[in-house]
Each structure stands twice: as C-alpha cells, then as structure tokens.
Image (cartoon, rainbow, N blue to C red):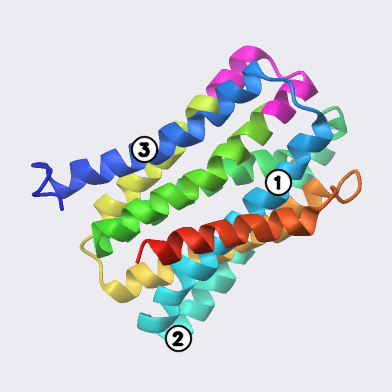
C-alpha cells in the first residue's frame, strides 16, 4: 500500500494519524460555533463511550487474545485499568486541594483522561500500522468517530465553565498533537519489537480505555441524572463501530 502511494510506511502512518487528528479537531470549532444545550452535550458521552468500547471489543482485544501470550495479555489489561484509576485518583486529590476548580461540571481527571486517551489512540494507530496498514487506517477512522464528539463535548463543556478562549484553543490543538505524537511513538518505537510485546501493549491500552469509559465517561454523563436514551446511545456507538469493523474486512 505504501509503495502504491509512492511514500514510506512512516509517512503513510503520519498521513493516517493526520486524518484522525483532523477529524477529531473538527469537534472543537463546531463546539465554538454552535451553542448546544448542556444535556445534549452530555448525552453525546454515552455514544462516544460505546464507540470506544467497540474499538476494544472488535479491533484491539480479539487480536491480542488470539495471538498474544495469555498471561501477558491479562496482566497488561489489568495494568492499563490500574493506570487510569491511579491517574483519576491523583487528579481527584488535586481537585480537593483546589476547591474552586472542584465546582466545575467536568473533573480534571476527565480532561487529563481525554488527552491521555488521545495519546493512546495515536499509539494504537501506530501499533496497528506496524501489523499492516489496513488496520491502522480502520483504527484511525473508527477512533475519529468517537474522538470528534468527545472533542466537541470537551470544548463545549469547557466553554460553559468559562474557560478562556485562548486556553480552549490550546486544548483543541493538543487534540491534534496527542494523536499524531502517539502514532509516531507507537510506530517509531514499537515497529521493531516482537509481536507479543505489541499485543501486550494493545491489551494495556484496552484496559485503560475501558476504565476511562466506566470510571469517567459514563459517570460524567450521569452526573445530573442519566441522559434520556443513554443505553440506546451507548449501543448505537458500539454498533456503529462494530459495523465499520465488520464491513472493512
């Protein structure tokens, strides 16, 4: 595929990651341009959570379980979840030390979690591209379907909280940097590693993403009461990613 386009694999990975980063970034100017009711913004979280769950269920863990070392996969999955839980705990302690910030609707842990999620998304694109480029492209497209509304939710909520426009712009640019930087890291550092090592890292990323969904995204969506049709929105996101992954085979 890379030869067909007349470019190296690395440049093609950058292109794939760039597509995902651009699609993700589009959520930010949309949030700046349009004022959406807070309940509608929060209702988008279950949809994005469903897509992230689908990414883990349909693309990441099947390959890891099928071809990876069982013990390493289980340990990696657990450590990924423990990493997010630890990060959430530390961010909560930071909020407690700054009561003024604790009054906001969106926790600092979720802000950090979203940025780390985007880095992991980029790493996953890079790792997927070290296997073959088709999975990398599928992952990029699938991730952007979830990260665009996630970027929209993040910027819209930050806007509602009164975060300065300049800071919101920096946050939006970080969306791009996290995805492309993660892809470069995943592809550059891991392409020469063993398949088992890459699959264990995919399991670790999966554990992180699932814990992000269960410990931050869904609780944040339910902070003011469960959004209407939250279960349908979640299953809609899950089913959409499942359809994308199945039709791409």
What secondary structure is found at the residue carrying circle 2?
Answer: helix
Q: Where does label 1 land, which residue?
A: 45
Where is residue 14? Give x, y as percent. 27, 40
Residue for point 56% across, 47% down: 146
- Quadrant for residue 22, please give it: top left
Bounds of the magenta segment = 156-170
Decide whether the magenta segment is chiefly helix, strand or loop.
helix
Extreme-bottom residue of the structure? 70
Real-space CA distance between mark 1 and mark 2, rounded to the nearest whole angstrom: 32 Å
Residue 34 visible in the displayed image: yes
Residue for point 8% across, 49% down: 3
Q: Where does label 2 land, which residue?
A: 70
Q: Earlier in the sequence, mark 2 or mark 3?
A: 3
Q: Where does label 3 land, which residue?
A: 19
What secondary structure is found at the residue carrying circle 1?
Answer: helix
Where is residue 214? Give x, y as percent. 72, 60
């Amino acid at each position: 595929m890379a030869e067909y386009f007349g470019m190296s694999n690395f440049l093609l990975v950058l292109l794939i990651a760039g597509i995902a980063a651009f699609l993700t970034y589009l959520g930010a100017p949309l949030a700046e341009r349009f004022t959406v009711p807070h309940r509608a913004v929060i209702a988008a979280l279950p949809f994005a959570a469903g897509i992230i769950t689908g990414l883990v269920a349909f693309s990441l863990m099947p390959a890891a379980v099928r071809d990876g070392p069982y013990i390493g996969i289980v340990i990696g999955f657990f450590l990924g979840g423990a990493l997010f839980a630890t990060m959430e705990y530390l961010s909560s302690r930071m909020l407690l030390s700054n009561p003024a910030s604790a009054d906001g609707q969106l926790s600092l842990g979720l802000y950090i979690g979203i940025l780390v999620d985007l880095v992991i998304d980029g790493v996953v694109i890079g790792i997927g591209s070290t296997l073959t480029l088709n999975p990398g492209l599928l992952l990029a497209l699938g991730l952007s379907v979830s990260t665009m509304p996630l970027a929209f939710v993040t910027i819209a909520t930050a806007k509602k909280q009164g975060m300065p426009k300049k800071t919101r712009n920096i946050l939006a640019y970080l969306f791009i940097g996290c995805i492309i930087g993660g892809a470069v890291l995943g592809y550059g550092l891991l392409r020469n590693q063993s398949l088992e090592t890459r699959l264990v890292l995919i399991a670790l990323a999966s554990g992180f993403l699932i814990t992000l969904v269960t410990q931050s995204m869904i609780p944040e969506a339910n902070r003011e009461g469960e959004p209407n049709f939250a279960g349908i929105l979640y299953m809609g996101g899950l089913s959409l990613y499942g359809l994308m992954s199945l039709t791409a085979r």
